[in-house]
Every structure is written in C-alpha cells, then in structure tokens.
Image (spheres, rainbow, N blue to C red):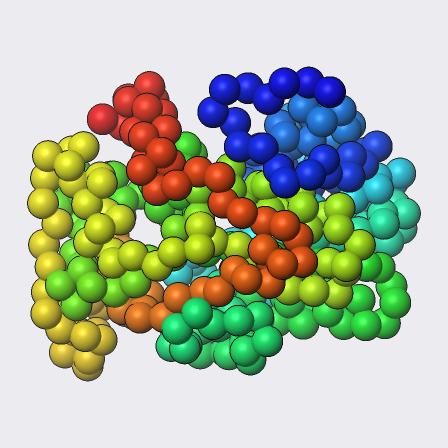
C-alpha cells in the first residue's frame, strides 16, 4: 500500500478500483481530476470529449449525438458521466440535447460496454433556488423555468428510469458549489469579474454559498462508485457548510485587493430589470457578467444542503476545509498568472 502524498486527502477506506474507467467530459474540470485519481489507483482510464486527447485515452465525440465514441466504453467497469453544459447564460436550445439526451446516450454506451455502475454528476440546482435549510435528498426536485435547472432535473429522471428498469446500476451525485484549481464557475470566473468590477452581490452578500473543494468532491464520487448500497441512490456532496456569499468571495477580494459592490435588493422586478439591462450592455461590449436574472436569483439562495446521507452510507467526510482549499486555490491562481 502506497503512502499518500502530503496534503492529499485520504478516503475513509480503500475504494473499489475498477480495471477500466470511462469518463464523459474527460478533458473538463472535473473529468481531469477524476482521471488522474483513478490512474493513481491503477485503473486504465478512457473517455470522450469535444477534442481528442490520444495520450490520455480520450476520443473526440459529442455525447448529444450517438456515435462511434460510445464503442470506446467497451470493457469499462465504471462509467462516470460528467459531460454537461454548466451555465445560466448558454443557448437554451442546447441544454436538452446535451444534458438530457446526452445522458441517455451515455447510459447506452455504459450498458453496451458492460459497465457495472453508472455515476451521473447532477447538481444541487435540481432543488431549484428556494428550498428548506439542510435540504435532504428525499426532498422533491423542482423545475423553475431556468434551462440549466430544468435540464438537470430531466437528466436525473433519465438515469433513475434506467436504474428502475434494471438496465444498469446508477448513482446520482449532486455537488454543491465546486471551487478550486481550474474551476471556472467559482474560481477563474469570479476572479476575472472582480478584476473587471463586474461582480455585484445582492442582499448585501448575505445569500448562502455551499462550497465543495474539488478534492473533497472527488473523494465522495469514488466512495459512491464503489459502495454497493449506493446503487439507485442520490447524494448531496458539499463541504457540509453554508457560508454567506460575501465570506466566500471575500477570499478573492483580499487576494485581488478589490472590493465587490453590494446592493440591498432581493430578487424583485426592479432588480431583474437592472440585471437584464446590465447583462445586455456587457454582451454588446463583449465582456462577461453574472449580473443577469438567473445569476442574481442563484446568489439570493438562503438554504443549505445536508450531507448526512453521504456521511452515513458512504463514510464521506470532507478532508479539506475552506481555509486550506482557498490556500491551494490561491497557490494555483498565482502559478497560472491570474493574480
């Protein structure tokens, strides 16, 4: 048994090590970290992404379209489905094709390839933006008219339907707000927005953020993939805390030595109008902004997500706390020239 690297979180127990793993979205933020972790454990890793990466076993393909990429999963024991559009501003027409139909294509590839387990990466947005404190997995999911949210709910239905029909054992993961090196939504994008003065926090920054450091999330996924009792189950995976937005983004403001403007308003018609006008202006100028209707609604969340089910059934326990996670994130941002 090898000694873990300094600073690398250790799992509660030795995970099941599949002989061969297939990852959709293998070249993405989460896919790369999953691939590296399974390779460290001795698994052969294959995958699909928009651009081929032959050196890392990744073929080119669009999961929204059935095709030759599916045959690349032949002989894989585990299929990890991370491929998805993750955005509040993307063309709505693409969400169903990628996040819903693409999930069915991934399931077909896993089944034909002989996989024992299909792990689907969903999101806590499946609860919508208004939900009880410490919301548990048994609480109903909710479509709210936001294309990304609705597609996540529908994608989960496709997976649970396949499991219920006995097609393949499936597990669904709902990550919180994933931050850390290479995270676009909660690391590189906020840094750029703060630098440009384009990030504004509603509710004076008192909305609730539910962080999960990338290594903690990967630990949880590995545990879910190897636990027999996780078949047919849904798991929230966060760092087990809810903090105010101004606290989380405050780490970045201190690094950048810049303040974030805050407003008192909740999500009202007036605020929506301001957000829409600002978003349109920035689009015309070719700059990036989260100050749009959906972004504001997301930053007004007040609920938190319970992880007791993952703790009890998987033995999951976040190993990297917020201070350490942000220290590692700062180190990476400086190394990559963002700061």
Q: Is residue 142 above or below residue 212?
A: below
Looking at the picture, how far across and down is residue 156, in whole percent?
A: 64, 67
User: Splitting the image into 4 quarters, where does residue 266 fall?
Assistant: bottom left
Residue 58: percent from left, percent from top: 69, 31
**133 versus 102 height, above or below:** below
- Residues 87 and 129: in front is 129
Asked if residue 92 is positioned above or below residue 76 in the image, the reply reads below
Q: Would you say residue 25 is visible in this rendering? A: no
Q: Residue at x 76, y 72 (%)?
A: 161
Taking the image as shown, residue 281 lies to the left or right of residue 335, namely left
**Residue 123 locus on image (x, y percent):** 52, 60
Residue 322 shows in the view: yes
Can you say which quadrant of the picture contains the C terminus? top left
Q: Residue at x 35, y 59 (%)?
A: 242
- Of the 4 image quadrants, the one containing the N terminus is top right
Residue located 88% across and 67% down the image: 166
Q: Residue 131 at what x, y percent from top left?
A: 41, 77
Residue 50 lies in what quarter of the image?
Answer: top right
């Amino acid at each position: 048994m090898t000694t873990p690297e300094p600073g690398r979180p250790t799992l509660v127990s030795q995970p099941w090590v599949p002989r061969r793993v297939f990852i959709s979205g293998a070249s993405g933020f989460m896919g790369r970290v999953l691939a590296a972790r399974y390779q460290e454990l001795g698994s052969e890793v294959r995958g699909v992404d928009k651009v081929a990466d032959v050196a890392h076993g990744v073929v080119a393909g669009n999961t929204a379209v059935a095709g030759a990429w599916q045959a690349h999963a032949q002989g894989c024991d585990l299929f990890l489905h991370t491929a998805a559009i993750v955005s509040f501003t993307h063309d709505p027409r693409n969400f169903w094709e990628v996040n819903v139909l693409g999930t069915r294509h991934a399931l077909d590839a896993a089944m034909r390839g002989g996989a024992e387990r299909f792990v689907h990466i969903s999101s806590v947005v499946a609860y919508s933006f208004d939900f009880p404190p410490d919301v548990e997995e048994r609480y109903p999911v909710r479509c709210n008219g936001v294309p990304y949210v609705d597609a996540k709910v529908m994608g989960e239905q496709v997976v649970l339907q396949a499991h219920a029909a006995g097609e393949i054992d499936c597990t669904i993961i709902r990550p919180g707000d994933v931050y850390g090196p290479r995270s676009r939504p909660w690391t590189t994008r906020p840094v750029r927005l703060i630098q440009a003065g384009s990030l504004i926090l509603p509710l004076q920054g008192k909305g609730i953020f539910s962080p999960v450091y990338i290594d903690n999330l990967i630990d949880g996924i590995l545990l879910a993939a190897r636990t027999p009792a996780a078949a047919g189950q849904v798991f929230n995976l966060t760092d087990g805390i809810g903090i105010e937005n101004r606290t989380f983004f405050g780490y970045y403001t201190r690094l950048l030595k810049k303040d974030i403007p805050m407003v008192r308003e909740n999500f009202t018609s007036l605020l929506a109008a301001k957000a829409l006008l600002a978003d349109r202006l920035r689009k015309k100028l070719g700059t990036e902004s989260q100050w749009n209707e959906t972004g504001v609604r997301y930053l007004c969340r007040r609920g938190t997500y319970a992880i007791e089910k993952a703790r009890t059934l998987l033995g999951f326990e976040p190993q990297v706390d917020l201070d350490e996670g942000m220290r590692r994130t700062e180190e990476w941002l400086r190394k990559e020239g963002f700061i």
